[in-house]
Image: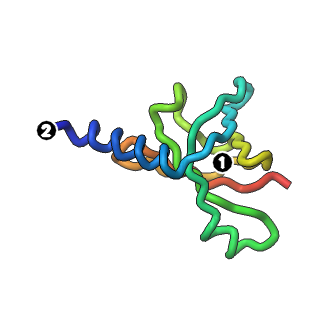
Amino acid sequence: MAAWSQQSDLANAAILAAFGQPVSYQQGAGDPFTVTGIVDKRTDEQRHPDTVYARLFVVLSDFSVPPDHGDEVTVDGAPYTVFEVQNDSAGGCWLSIREKI
């Protein structure tokens, strides 16, 4: 039987394959790169009508340097800034992002 981390990796890969979309990610002055993420706009944007907020689920193994506050993400052509990072114990990460206006 596979270890928990292997099972988590398989689950994350299946979920991203089914529901993910490519997004452009940039850390500091580094070059942008593409990662697959799941965009969730159902919660925060409803509480903040003046700015669009969302959450982005990514897998930490897609990053050579962990995601951080201030990183930039482009989703469907719209630029966002990461303002909160929440790692989970299964190798995934939820990024709270705010659209740059």
Q: Secondary structure at mark 2?
A: loop
The residue carrying mark 1 is 82
Check disc 1 and report its element: helix, strand or loop.
Answer: strand
* Residue where numbered disc 2 is placed: 1
Q: Residue furthest left?
A: 1
Q: Is residue 65 above or below residue 21?
A: above
Relative image position of residue 6 (x, y in whole percent) = 27, 36
Is residue 37 positioned above or below 47 on the image?
Answer: above
Q: Could you say which is closer to the camera, residue 75 or residue 47?
A: 75
Q: Residue at x 35, y 39 (%)?
A: 9
The vertical placement of 92 against 52, above or below, is above
Q: Is residue 22 visible in the rendered structure shown here?
A: yes
**Badge 2: residue crowd in 10 Å (few <14, some 14–19, many ≥20):** few
Q: Is residue 71 left or right of residue 68?
A: right
Q: Position of residue 2 (x, y in %)?
A: 19, 37
Quadrant placement of the C terminus: bottom right
Q: Residue at x 47, y 37 (%)?
A: 60
Disc with the residue nearer the chain's start (1 vs 2): 2
The type of residue carrying mark 1 is Val
Left or right relative to 8: residue 28: right
Question: In the drawing, what numbered circle is on residue 71?
Answer: none
